[in-house]
Amino acid sequence: MAFRFLTAGESHGQALVAIVEGMAAGLPLSEKHIAGDLARRQRGYGRGARMQIETDQAEILSGVRHGLTLGGPIALLIHNKDWGNLSQGSGRPWAEIMSVSPVDTGVEPVTRIRPGHADLPGALKYGHGDVRNVLERASARETAARVAVGAVARRFLEEFGVEVRSHTVAIGAVKSEYNGVLDWAQVEASEVRCADAVSGRAMMAAIDEAKKNGDTLGGVFEVIVSGVPVGLGSHVHWDRRLGARIAGAVMSIHAVKGVEVGDGFNGSATPGSRFQDAILPGPNPMTWHRTTNRAGGIEGGMSDGEPIVVRAAVKPIATLARPLPSVDLRSGEAVQAHYERSDVCVVPAAGVVGEAMVAIVLAGAMLEKFGGDHIDETKRNHKAYLESMTLRRGDAIDR
């Protein structure tokens, strides 16, 4: 059974729901394991008022008993606290605007299309005359459910010594000037999740300036994964290549418009003799190491034992306090785009979502590689595989 998940729910609906399938039995898992990542997603300089309303907490409804996974589907529920509040502008409660049942009095439709959102293609594709039928599900609020699923995947990876972290590389034109050695405590203490305190303050100043101008800012985050064994993924088919699976997962995050593994974009302008990561003998005949990791831990569609490094470019948030020119979906007339309460910058939070998506892919790849209906079986298979790698190195020397 493949490790997979589905989410359901709308931004201002009653709740978000996630179903996680394919997790091995016997994994220690509690709501506390999920709470930390949900809290990290909500933080970050430049977040909007919605984050002051919500206090995301995932409730485990099924798939766990007495603190251990059962091997069946895990159901997660995250209530939307904003459901009971009044909506911005109309003054009507979200419970009425997003009611599952028909309401007695009409709800004003959203017809002013917002550039950069799913509004126009979604309304045309699904035949909606009210853009709210699109924007509620297209909202990045859905990533709270993904982060909850990612926390389950992270809990699994921790059993094998795999750690998934992220940090902010750039916001707007401000780039982090860290020296290559990451202090993860500094990253988590920073309001923009930047490893360099000086650059972090400059990023915050840039966000303040954008907010003053009614504008938004994008940027770049980087996910780094340590402890990944050699051989996850495969070279034999396009859809089994690990880099492709990770890139697709990260690209699926709202507002992400570009993904690279290792020095993908910068390396394209580098001669091959300076780009490839030379393989050097280790301290004894049965080990090897590399002094560089420009490939980002993935070669030929497979993990190569080095840390996996993934970067993503996040576009500026499309919802603007000073809306762009647009058209009305029904009349076709020129209007100012609809404005929904929004963030100024989401790059720090997007990094946490990036961690979740990478963790989900790697958990799936680990379960594919090592199998096991119970976590103890998976661990035995993992241990045997690592031992066999050492034996293979020795066999190669003997031959």
Image (spheres, rainbow, N blue to C red):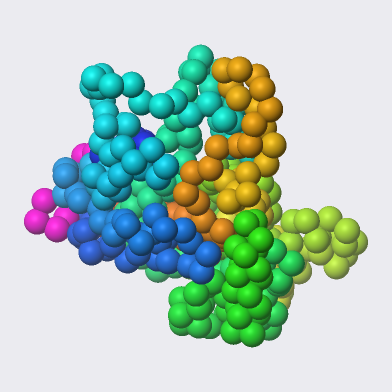
On screen, residue 128 above or below 234: above
Q: Residue at x 45, y 30 (%)?
A: 132
Viewer-proximal residue among 125 and 128: 128
Q: Where is residue 23 in the image (x, y as percent from the top left)?
A: 29, 46
Can residue 311 be found in the magenta stretch? Answer: no
Q: In which quarter of the image is residue 206?
A: bottom right
Q: Can residue 157 be seen in this view?
A: no
The residue shown at (59%, 84%) is 197
Apparent side of residue 294 relative to residue 321 in the rendered image (left or right): right
Asked if residue 66 is among those painted magenta in the image, a careful observer would answer yes
**Nearest to the observer: residue 55 or residue 306:** 55
Q: Quadrant of the N terminus?
A: top left
Residue 62: give x, y in percent of width and height.
16, 43
Seen from the viewer's position, the closer of residues 393 and 8 is 8
Furthest residue toward left: 66
Q: Quadrant of the C terminus?
A: bottom right
Tally of numbered tags: 0
Q: Residue at x 60, y 63 (%)?
A: 211
Q: Position of residue 371 (x, y in %)?
A: 35, 46
Q: Can residue 326 be seen in this view?
A: yes
Q: In this view, does 31 lie to the left or right of 250?
A: left
Residue beneath the point at 53% across and 42% down: 339
Query: In screen coordinates, is 237 left or right of 129?
Result: right
Q: Which residue lies furthest to the top in this view?
A: 127
Residue 14: x %, y % from top left: 26, 39
Q: Give the range drawn in magenta.
A: 65-73
Q: Is the magenta stretch mostly helix, strand or loop?
A: loop
Q: Quadrant of residue 2?
A: top left
